[in-house]
Image (cartoon, rainbow, N blue to C red):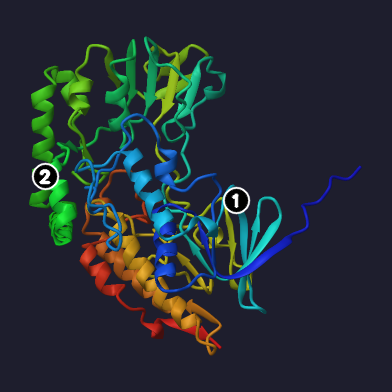
Amino acid sequence: MSKPGPAAPTAVKTVQIAILGTGMGGLCMAAQLRRAGIDSFVMIEKAGEIGGTWRDNIYPGSGCDVPSHLYSFSFEPKVDWSRKFALQPEILDYMKQVARKYGLRPFIRFNTEVAEARFDEAERLWRIRTTTGEEITANVVVSGTGQLNRPAYPKIAGLETFAGKAFHSARWDYDVDLTDKNVAVIGNGASAIQFVPEIAPKAKKLTIFQRSANWIVPKPDRPYTEFEKRMFRRFPWLVKLHRYQIYLTLERNFLAFIQGSFFGKLFERASRKEIETHVKDPALAKKLTPDYPAGCKRILLSNDWFPTMARPNVDVETSHIAKVTPEGLVTEDGVTHKADVIIYSTGFETTTFLAPMKIVGRGGRDLNEVWAKGAEAHRGVAVAGFPNFFILYGPNTNLGHNSIIFMLECQVNYILQCIEALRSPKVKSIEVRKEAEDAFNRELQEDMQRTVWAAGCSSWYKTAEGKVTNNWSTFTMRYWWQMRHPDFAEYALGA
């Protein structure tokens, strides 16, 4: 008997705009559409709730390393943030408040995963097929899936043989009790520095398997006082001023990411001082001191990482993992590290962007194939050969020094103006010209060479071949200037 074929597509409806994802980018796009009086859109969400990375990353201590008042929309300020750096529950609650205020939930199709979006050249619209075979057609597709949504798992021999419990930090399993357990944490990045200090007091022994050390500086965090929150409520201009002060402070920090920068040395000095203060063992201090310039990998903020590393029940292992056995992990020096639980703190698949979705543009071009040598887009939002298709938090729009929310608002403003152009009866499609996209990316990659991201260390900012595909190459003020208005001479407008 032959296997049944895929279910026949069932047309749901045609909308003007389809937004993929309900993270910060998708919510920003949808809220601004409603503010502009545009209601013909649908939001497609593979999970059962909004929130993106803030829905998924519920590990102990999960929070943001951008100050709260800047990690929120300028058009929807929150005056009563509990602290300078909000934790995950408060951020997710803020996102739900935005969805409620702008009436977004009726526009969301939950538990709906996109398998493919294909541009119909004859009709000049996108046909979106879900994994259940449903079809949604839209004039415009805006991807809001972001860069940090697909957990990356280590490729280590024998992982499947491990007899204990194992999970990724982005899929935290609260059913696993870590009390008096031997816990192995693979990786020591941005998630690990938040959850490791939370779980270390519970564990019998905690072993951090570190590939390379991080530059970690103090986090200037504290609760906001009731007086401060009362003043923010009474004088909204104070919130704007506070937000602007935070922005300028963070914007200045880009200077630390220029190769050989004096400001970069200041970050290194601050990190070394923290190590000297909290770690008295010279061998451990050496393990925790990076051997690359500050900023080449993400600079991290923490007040309790180094004190945690100095705990008697915490070990930092720098020998590479050779294999995993039912009992634990064996390093290349032949030592077996017994473990009851393995936690993968190995980050995300960041350079593949929209995968595993298949995005097929004009002429049958598959976006994953177009990006095979490294993703790139015009101003991070548009790709030649893919009309009426826009990306939020796309290639080269990540930051090492400021708020992604600022970048998202710049992108949404730009995309809205492109959508307005499409609302004209004379314009059916809008597609960036290849020469404009190429010129933009040549300039961007030339700028990139003066930054520490182009230095020798490996990081999630770049591909295995060394191309930086994730980060913006200079100050965010320049991005804002470029994104104020689309230059329609850079686009082909189809009649």
| Left or right of 239 on screen, residue 141 | right
Name the foreground residue: 237 vs 381: 237
Looking at the image, which residue is at 60% across and 51% down?
112
In the shown orientation, is residue 105 left or right of residue 403?
right
Which residue corresponds to the image point at 10% horizontal and 45% vertical from the top-left? Answer: 265
Task: List x then y, in percent, for residue 214.
Answer: 24, 35
Q: Are marks 1 and 2 in contact (CB under 8 Å)?
A: no
**Residue 39, percent from left and from top:** 51, 70
Q: In this picture, is 219 found above or below 78? A: above
- Residue 475's disc number: none
378 or 283, nearer to the observer = 378
Image quarter of residue 84: top left
Q: Which residue is mark 1?
A: 113
Question: Which amino acid type corresponds to the residue marked 1 in the rendered image?
Answer: Glu
Q: Quadrant of the C terminus?
A: bottom right
Residue at image position (24%, 45%) is 81
Point out the frontmost of discs 1 and 2: 2
Label 2 secondary element: helix
Q: Is residue 220 above or below residue 192?
A: below
Categorize mark 1 by other alpha carbons within 10 Å: few (<14), some (14-19), many (20+): some
Q: Is residue 259 at all visible to an observer of this figure?
A: no
Question: Mark 1 or 2 closer to N-term?
Answer: 1
Amino acid at pointer 2: Phe
- The residue identified by callout 2 is 227
Q: Is 60 located above or below residue 431 in the figure? A: above
Q: Position of residue 324 (x, y in %)?
A: 48, 19
C-alpha distance separating marks 1 and 2? 45 Å
Kind of element beneath mark 1? loop
Q: Quadrant of residue 397?
A: bottom left
